[in-house]
Amino acid sequence: MSQALRGIKTKSKKTGVSAARRRMSPEERRAQLLACAIEVFATRGIRRAGHGDVAKVAGCAVSTVFLYFPTREELVDAVLDEIEAFYASIARTVHSDEIDAQAVLLAHSRQFRESIDSHPEHALVLLNWAANVRSRVWPRYMEMMESSVRTHRRTIERGIAEGTIDDGVDAESAARVIIGYANMSIQLRLAEFEDDRADQVSRRMINALLSPTLNETAA
């Protein structure tokens, strides 16, 4: 088991119990239960996690969890809302028009990979979400990916317009390949792949996609 996974177990034992010992406002209680739910979903998976698991981690009655999340669908949707918002915030922060387009793409790849260290539960829920192809949450996952494709495509098109990316590059296809690599980069981090090596792989992959020389040769 990787250090990242061991860290999740340690954190999940602490999140709810200390908070449960003091009186909280409804907003604080919901935020606490949601944090516990994310930990549970990271360890048990989207299909298996439930209200009872969250209550155990939070140190509260199961009825309390149902009070804030009346159905399992609402509990799942609340967790996925948080995961989606977290990764969308990374994209908004990184994709600046003031930074070279290729540098933006590399920075986004790096921050996505490093989320396994900064927010390990979020990263593991995301990987599990990506594997739930036949569940009701799959269409929502695909919508999130399409939004990411649009963000990456706009950055690539900006690079083409600014002359830093070859104008023969297919922005849509390149965006999809880069996003497809993102989940793999988290898996590399879980496998304790060194950051320098992971950065080198990302850089080579992005350069290969956007290199004028390689595109001319392929043509």
Image (cartoon, helix red, strand yellow):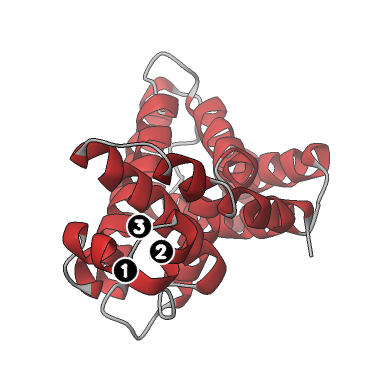
Please give the residue where the numbered disc 3 appears in the rendered image: 145
Q: Is residue 194 left or right of residue 117?
A: right
Which element carries disc 3, helix, strand or loop? helix
Point out which mark residue 54 bears.
2
**In front: mark 3 or mark 2?**
2
Looking at the image, residue 47 lies above or below residue 127? below
Q: Residues within 10 Å of mark 3 (few under 14, many from 20)?
A: some
Residue furthest to the top: 98
Nearer the observer, 28 or 200: 28
Residue type beneath disc 3: Met
Residue type beneath disc 1: Val
**In front: mark 1 or mark 3?**
1
Q: Position of residue 69 (x, y in %)?
A: 21, 62
Dot placed on the residue nearer the N-terminal end, 2 or 1: 2
Please give the residue where the numbered disc 1 appears in the rendered image: 62
How many numbered dots are placed on residues in this image? 3
Looking at the image, residue 211 lies above or below residue 144? above
Which element carries disc 1, helix, strand or loop? helix
Q: Residues within 10 Å of mark 2 (few under 14, many from 20)?
A: many
Q: Is residue 194 left or right of residue 39?
A: right
Which residue corresponds to the image point at 45% horizontal and 23% vertical from the top-left? 163
Which residue corresponds to the image point at 61% horizontal and 37% vertical from the top-left? 110
Q: Position of residue 37 (x, y in %)?
A: 40, 59
Dot placed on the residue nearer the N-terminal end, 1 or 3: 1
Disc 2 to disc 1, C-alpha distance? 8 Å
Q: Is residue 85 visible?
A: yes
Q: Position of residue 183 (x, y in %)?
A: 56, 58
